[in-house]
Image: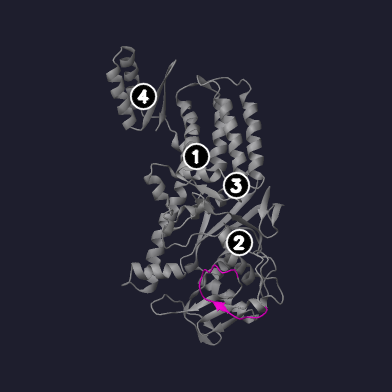
Amino acid sequence: MRIYNTLTKKVDDFAPLKGGIARVYSCGPTVYNNAHIGNLTAYIYSDILQRALLLGGFKVQRVMNFTDIDDKTIVAAQEKYPDLPAKESLKKLTRHFEKLFLEDMTEIGNDTKSLQFVRASESITEIQNLIQNLVKFGVAYTADDGVYFNIAEYSKKRKYGQLSHVDAPAEAKARIDNDEYDKESARDFALWKKQKTGEPAWDFEIDGQNMAGRPGWHIECSAMSVRHLGQPFDIHTGGVDHIFPHHENEIAQSTAGSQPEVYARFFFHNEHLLVDGAKMSKSKNNFYTLADIVKKSFSPLDFRMLILQSHYQTPSNFSWENLTAAHNRLKAWRNLAELRWQVSDVEDDGQQDIVKRLLESAKQALLDNLNTPETLKYIDQSIDEVSKNMAGLDFAAVNMIFDFIDKYLGIKIYDHTPDIADSIKELIVVRQVERANGNYGKSDEIREALSAQGVEIKDVSNGVIWSRK
């Protein structure tokens, strides 16, 4: 298997460090609001990475965090629940949006059952221990408002900027306590923030004082990833917007002092999702959540298909036209799957070997740096192959295709193409009788009744083919 590694700036062969188990840490959501479709793009690609690792014959241990302590969650909790104690309001807000996030993850086809979710709020001891260690080795220092990482001191022994190529300062001239910052210049960043009025706080004995407060964003991921995966672990995932400063700072604070020189062996980053060719922004009125897509009568899996049609290293472009194209592709796949309830199983006439070869090509495309567009191309070719004779299908060949799609692409074909109810089948038979007797008005009424129940019908030479709307 081959993956583009942001650390080396090239596509590298991948194999787990030990035990045949790929240990993967995925930067998860900051749970203060609904995830938008740009966020979900990163989670779809990291889910496909997990599936590709399994396809490559590896076992996978994957951890994803909930950022439930940071600037955004605290402000949102204060605004939403001003009368509750700070910790209680923070927990109530973040648990609510955790639940909504997991629902979205399931809807877009991601595997959440095999994921281990961890919270920053439940990792305070590990975070504080790591900060204590950094202070002990002189790469962090206390200030009036918290504890900061000393980039200049770190750079005397290790390379800061190995991921982003942002240069470390010759000496510490500025520091920043914002959890997120866009300016691409290295500044000492907050590991721990002293409590401000109204904020939640955890006791922290350091440098002979109790600096009650809460962790900074970057230190949370370092502590959680190493706690659950060890160090070094195999793959760290996230969007390209995480490269600097978040992942760069994670590397620094995880390799400073007495810690190992390597934090994670591979960094896997997906490109941005554009909307009509532009960055998503509320001010541009092009900011969408999954609920917005559903309101337009599209499926969350239509969105997944749209994302898979682009390589993760290339910006995906969301537009309603592109989503319609993805929907049509998915509908064609589902229409074929629904035929298995309507036609007979025919003997193998060589289709199975052809399908096996096409699926092997699809597999190799997925293992070659997650080339999902190429994978979809081979899936389409295999579907064209088994669709040559619509009067009957080679069920074994069809099942090979949809087994691959569901297991390695997460499109959930089988879940969405069960047989229709007997009552609907009976209505279809009644319509055929009415049509055969020339009662076209009645036939049209039944067609409309079927449509109202979500079933479309198409008259063919040997009867009727139904499909879901």
Label number found at residue 425: 4
Q: Residue furthest bottom?
A: 208
Prevailing secondary structure of the magenta residues: loop
Relative to 73, does residue 64 appear above or below in the rendering?
above
Segment colored magenta: 170-184
Residue in the picture at 62% in, 67% down: 248
- Indicate which disc residue 229 carries: 2
Count neighbours of disc 1 (C-alpha within 10 A) and say few if under 14, some if 14 to 19, many if 20 or more.
Answer: many
Residue 113 visible to an observer of this rendering: no
* Residue mark closest to the camera, 4 vs 2: 4
Q: Report the Cα–Cα distance between label 1 and label 4.
A: 29 Å
Q: Residue flagged by tag 2: what amino acid is it?
A: Leu
Whether 182 is among the magenta residues is: yes
Q: Is residue 387 above or below residue 196?
A: above
Query: Is residue 173 at least partly visible in the picture?
Result: yes
Tell me what residue is drawn at x 41 percent, y 42 percent.
298
Crowding at mark 4 (Cα within 10 Å: few <14, some 14-19, many 20+): some
